Amino acid sequence: MTEGRRRLAVLVSGTGSNLHALLDASHDGSLPADVVLVVSDRHEAAALDRARDAGISAVAVPPGPGEERSRYDSTIAAIVAEHDPDLVVLAGWMRILTMSFLRHFPGQVVNLHPALPGELAGTNAIERAFDEARAGTRTATGVMVHLVPDEGVDDGPVLASVEVPIHADDTLDTLAVRMHAAEHELLVHTIADLCSPIPSAKG
Ligand code: GRF
């Protein structure tokens, strides 16, 4: 691990394209941080393979049948804490974290959501934006990165956001491609900003 670089734990549930963007940026020097752990709540998440291919510790921890959320979150928190991360990045993590997790990482948990602040919280935000555009009630959507201080869903202090237009000839696929590209860029830039030392006022 390079001296001075930040440590990222990344929580995922699916494909892992945002994890991949972080890994690429870590390797090419644009992100002064290393992914030190990837946790998935699903064994079959392709993101786990991406992490293992990159030589990163990657674990699947599915919740047990009927397991209480707080108990599950305590388990995940213990695993993450062992890796002493500076930031915990939720990159396509599809569970709401309770305070049993969040209280261990105050000001350190960052979520990516494919919608603008205050809009389309929850799952399938890209599909819902597309449907609204087709219905004539929306011409754009966007992406945001925000802190996760509590159990609010896709809610919390916004670190960065970017608008993504919805074109008249978009299909759900073309919109999704544009949204994912916007996510990758915004997530990497926002995490890089959080990881960069603040320049001294004395110059
Ligand atoms: C992203 O759209 C993320 O914002 C969302 O789930 C998707 C995950 O994509 N909530 P990936 O697993 O990073 O490819």
Image: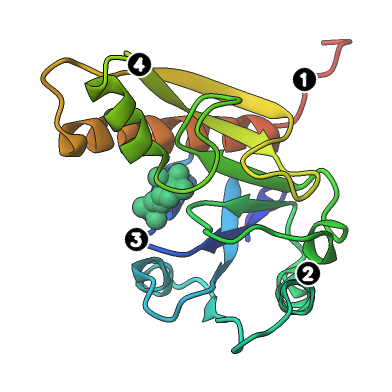
- Relative to 184, residue 62 above or below: below
**Amino acid beneath label 2:** Ala
Mark 1 sits on what residue?
199
Nearer-the-camera pick, 25 or 3: 25
- Distance CA(mark 2)–CA(mark 3): 24 Å
- Of mark 4 and mark 1, the one earlier in the sequence is 4
Q: Is residue 109 left or right of residue 58?
A: right
Residue at image point 89% right, 10% down: 202
- Distance CA(mark 3)–CA(mark 4): 28 Å
Q: Secondary structure at mark 2?
A: helix
Q: Residues within 10 Å of mark 1 (few under 14, many from 20)?
A: few
- Distance CA(mark 2)–CA(mark 1): 28 Å
Q: Secondary structure at mark 1?
A: loop
Mark 2 sits on what residue?
81
**Amino acid beneath label 1:** Pro
Image mark for residue 15: 3
Image mark for residue 138: 4
